[in-house]
Structure formats: structure tokens, C-alpha cells
Image (tube, helix red, strand yellow):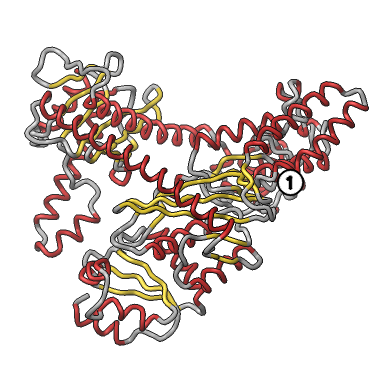
Amino acid sequence: MGRESLQETLKNLPDKPGVYMMKDEAGRVIYVGKASVLKNRVRSYFQKGAVSPKTRILAGKIADIEYIVTSNDVEALILESNLIKEKSPRYNVRLKDDKHYPYLKVTDERFPRVTVVRRREKGGRTFGPYTDSAAVRTTMRFLRKLFPIRTCNLDLSGELNYRPCLLYHIGRCGAPCAGLQTEEEYNKLIEEVCLFLEGRHEKLIPALRDKMQAAAKNLEFEKAARLRDQVRALERMVEKQKVLSVNKEDLDVIGLAVEGAAVCVQVYFVRDGKLVGREHFFLDRTADEETGELLTAFVEQYYARASFIPRLVLLPVPVDEQEVVEAWLAEQRGGRVELRVPQRGEKRRMVEMAQENARLVLEEHLSRETRRAEANRIGLEQLQEVLDLPHLPERIEAYDISNFHGAEAVAAMVVLEDGVPAPDEYRRFKLRTQGPDDYAMMQEVLRRRFTRALKEQEELDALPPEEQEKAMAEMRFVKMPDLILIDGGKGQLNAARDVLRELGLEDIPTISLAERLEEVFVEGRPEPILFGRDTPALHILQRVRDEAHRFGLSYHRKLRDKRTTRSALDDIPGIGPKRKRALLRKFGSVKGVAQASLEELQTVPGISRELAERIREQLG
């Protein structure tokens, strides 16, 4: 779109609420925003005079604008949040790596389980997000020790006739699968689990004490002892919780610290007046956003994912369009929500404490990042010197093969840029080579990767210069590595070098890393290179090799699991994954489905008489 077309779009903007998407010359969405009046907000980016540096930079890159009209401001806020998550625009403030934050979920099935999930899902109750995966695992272990809930994946929707497992015999599960625990008893246990996950530990203790005394009275001393241990564990936890509010209220306290492009937000969770937990988050700051803009972006993105929204949220500074944000939060919560900036007293001290902790976490983070960047720089310089590379290996590609006796063979390509993993650049290949031949498999993946790269480079060279940037953004293999790392020894290295010579790419430096002694093989050198165990150069090579192994193995397992779960039901027209699961759940196995009568098959949801007859015909 030219400047004339852009001006035409600006003229025709409606005076209604909505969301706008700004795009660059390559057609990429670079900014998503919301507005109460689209016409006024979007035109403000192009006004002369007092605009921020970020706005000037953004306006200079805008080639096209799309907008979506909404019925009100709250709807615009929701749509903006969804589009930012979907498009990941460069100039929006975003929660860093938010897709990796885990949640704890209490499922909504009969005899619920507690599982770790990576996103909020429909059904059941979700708690989180949590930023520390290790802390989530610790919580799960403590939870299962404290409450004897089931950990199995058995389908308990039907008859409860399973045999109790070891966990029942050691007192870690009530064996609902065998009908040894009623639904009512189990659901009371789940209510206690939810109170625990909400941080309301004090409310659990009286009920557990009553259970303990009842068990002792009935001479169930082992059960009483387990309950006593639970009470003591909870009492120790309550002792560690700091009293922040004498009013015993539920609230979140948010603190924010900014240092250059780095932003840290600290959230304190206060339940019944006690500090029950805290989490910190980092934001991707794009330019010179004010504190209020940063805080607004965080509140909108965090509470769109949060499992619980309290009635009161304390902030260090006001958010933008506070009434709209409060209305949206109230809609999310199902009740009034107040965003307050306290000026004095107890609540002001809470915010200051959160602010101070955000600053300390940010300082530690920046110090760690500085040390890591320095170690990466030293490691890359060591690699350049020892391997006699023409320039610093800013882009390193590692390749790994995963297969099981030649079956479900896959290859992984993993990329480090400046010593840091670049997941967007990772590629994986389902290999066509038959049989367990690692050399042929390595040659296949390299031939496919670099043949594609040469083809894309030809296509790029044929385009006018002004179109090359947009085309390059859509190409998956055109970038060339400064160093190739092969997982293996001399044999794998020689196989790789043969392909590169065949394609005229023998100038790309290539090495292999043998895992047993961490030996580095280089073509033309009779002896392997042995880096010191603690050298930054070896750490970089190990990092990219291990990441390639992890990435390839996860793909191989996915394909292997898909193959092993395939059955004769997959070949029957009209039987998809959902109906297949329903049939297996009902009859236990493919053999059970084959032995079922037409009438029995039709009792399964989605199975018509015609489909039941087809199943009988195919499996008969």
C-alpha cells in the first residue's frame, strides 16, 4: 500500500470503538492497539509535534492499517489481547515467554485429578500461571503427599472394578478405581486441595483436626497419624506466611521496576490478609513506553490468563483507561474489581514492598544476563580461534538423527544465534531413508536443507531489491550458517562434508561432536580437539547439540506414539479420534469392539446403526 492509499484509509476511519493493526512493507503486523474512537486514535500517530520517539519510529514503518469495529470498549480490549497473543507484533509490550508458564488444573471428570497444563483450558479449575516450573513440581509432590488423590489416568466414568495399585497400599490413594472410596469422600478431598491451591491453608486445619480426632476415637491410629502429619505440615506453612492486612481480605499487589529495555513485574497474592505467594514476570519492552503503559499491558495480559481475580488490585501508578480495564476485569471475575493506587498507610507499604522486590529481581536478572552474554562472547571467540574460522560463528546450526532401528526416523535442525537458542529457526524433517543407516540419514537431511536454501536464494536474487525483504521473511531456509555441528564422530562428519561438496558449499565450516569424550572432529585434522570441560566454547557446543537431541527426540516420540496407538478402527470411514476414544472407553479394546453387538455399539455417542454395521463388517 502506498502513502496515498494510507492517507485514504486514515480519511475513512470510523468514529467508533475498535482495534487497529498496523503493518509494515512486508505485510507483517507490527503493532496492535485499541481505541474508544478509531478515527481520533489512529490519526494521532501521524500528527506533527509532541509525539514520543516510539510513535515516530512506528509511524515511519507503517505501510498499511487494518481495523475491526467493536460494539464497546471492553470488547475492543478483549480483541486487542487476543490479537497481540496471535500476531506477536514487534512494537507491543508483551509478557516474555508467557506460553511457557505452567498452570495446575483440577479436572472436571468423575474422581478429578490434579495435572500440570501449559494453558488455561475449559472445564475444571485452573490455578496459576506460575513462572517457576521447579516450584510447580515441588507443589505437586507436596500436594500428593498431603492429600491421597489419584494420580493414574484410568477412566473412572463407568464401573469401578479395577485392582488397587501400590499407592493404595501405602496410604497415598483411597482407590476410588476399586470402589473403596465414595464420590462424596473423594470430592471433599478435592475441595481441600482447591483450598490449598488458593492459599487458604488456615481454613483446612480445623477440618483436618476433626478428622484426626475422629480417626483416633475409632482406633484408626495409622489414619490419625497421617492426618496429624498433614496438620503439622500445614501449620508450618501458615507460620511462614506473612500477615500483610489486618482486614483479612483478598487482594493482589503489583510492583514494577524498569531498567533500560528490561522490565520486571512482581505480583503478591494476599488471601485472607496473608501473603500466600508471589510471582515475577518479565516484559518485552519495545521502546520508551511510560510506566502506566507498561502496567496496563501487564494487567490486561496477566489477568486474561490468571485463574483468580481478587476484588482489589493495588498498583504503583494508574493504568490507562482504568474504567474500561475495571469493567473488563469485572466481567472476567463475575463481580466488581477495583484498581487502586494507594497513597498512604498499610496498602501503600504493600505496594512499596512489591516495588522493592521487583527491583531486586530485575537487578539479579540483568546481572545473570550480562554474565551469560559475556560467556557466550568468549565462547564464540574461542571457537573462532581454535577452529580457525574466517569470522565469529554468530549462527550455529546443529543436526541430530533420532530413530528406533531405522523406524520413524527424524532429523532435527537447531539454531544458536550469538550463542542463544533461536526456536523460530528450528526445523525438523521426517526422513525417507530406509533402514538404520545414520550416515545416509544425515546426508539426506543436509541435502534437503541446503538444496532448499540454494533454490530460495535463486528466487530471492531474481526479485527487485525492494521486494526482497518481504520475500525473505517468508523463506524458511535461505539463511546460511557460520558453523555446522554434527552429532557424532568422524564418520558422520565425512558423510556431511560429502554432501556440502556435492552442493558447492564446502566453504561452510563443519565439525562433529562425539558425546563419549566430547571430542570435536574437524576435516583435515588427524586428531580430535579436546576443549577443557569448563570452557565457554565447549558449553556452547554442548548446548546446541543437546538441544538438537531434545528437539529431534520429541518429534520421534510423537511419531512413534502415533504409530503405536493406531488400530484397525483408524481404517473405518466415519471413525475419527473422538469416536475411537469413545468406543475404546466403552469396550476396553479393539477386540471388545469387534465382539460387541449392533445394539451395544449404538449405545456409544455418535455411532449410528449404519456406522455400527460398518464396524461389524470391517472387524468381523
Q: Residue at the spot x=48%, y=45% of the render?
A: 101
Horizontal placement of 347 versus 186: left or right? left
Q: Residue at the spot x=59%, y=56% of the render?
A: 346
Seen in the picture, residue 12 relative to 256 is either above or below; the reply is below
Res 555 seen here? yes
Q: Quadrant of the C terminus?
A: top right
Which residue was labeled with disc 1?
598
Horizontal placement of 74 versus 178: left or right? left
- Secondary structure of the residue carrying tag 1 is helix
On the image, the x and y values in percent for residue 43 come to: 30, 81
Q: Quadrant of the N terminus?
A: bottom left
On the image, the x and y values in percent for residue 504 come to: 8, 36
On the image, the x and y values in percent for residue 400 come to: 30, 29
Horizontal placement of 45 versus 239: left or right? left
Figure quadrant of residue 522 = top left
Amino acid, disc 1: Leu
In front: 410, or 487? 487
On the image, the x and y values in percent for residue 12 come to: 33, 86
Seen in the picture, residue 171 relative to 580 is either above or below; the reply is above
In front: 172, or 158? 172
In front: 562, or 193? 193
